[in-house]
Amino acid sequence: MERLARGVYATPDAWVDEMYMLSLRSHRVVFSHESALLLHGLAEREPEAPTVTLPSGYNASALRRDGVRVYFIKADVLSLGRIELPAPDGNIRVPEKSFLLPVVEL
């Protein structure tokens, strides 16, 4: 068995859902930008690096060191429109679709 995260283990040949594993690192992680588009089925390909948004003041140095693109926003705004989508290994947090797409006035 290989340790993937605190309290999470898998056999060496098991497929690992990297986004779910990233969400286990903190309950505050919300997938955003290109990652959220992919999870909603609105992107054609996987982003080069996962993108997350966290509350302002969160120490994201370990996430950045692991190649995650990190954005910050006020905690009360981050919780607006946040939903959970099913992933192969569990649920992950993303903004609702309406928070991803710009509003275009004609």
Image (cartoon, helix red, strand yellow):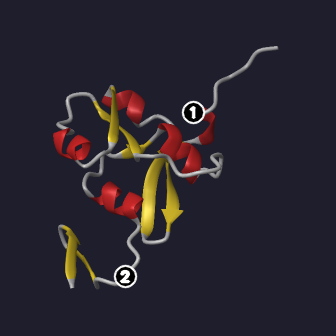
- Quadrant of the snapshot with the C terminus: top right
Badge 2 element: loop
Q: CA distance from mark 1 to mark 2?
A: 34 Å
Question: Does any portion of residue 50 appear in the rendered image?
Answer: yes
Identify the residue at horizontal 29%, vertical 59% (top origin).
24
User: Callout 2: few (<14), some (14-19), or many (20+) C-alpha neighbours within 10 Å?
Assistant: few
Measured as percent of width and height from the top left, residue 73 is found at 35, 27
Q: Is residue 10 left or right of residue 94?
A: left
Measured as percent of width and height from the top left, residue 76 is found at 36, 29
Q: Is residue 19 left or right of residue 47?
A: left
Q: Nearer the viewer, residue 58 or 62?
A: 62
1 or 2: tag closer to the N-terminus: 2
Identify the residue at horizontal 57%, vertical 44% (top origin).
37
Give me the disc on residue 14.
Answer: 2
Q: In the orientation shown, which residue stands out farthest toward the top?
A: 106
Q: Nearer the viewer, residue 74 or 47?
A: 47
- Determine which residue is flagged by label 1: 99
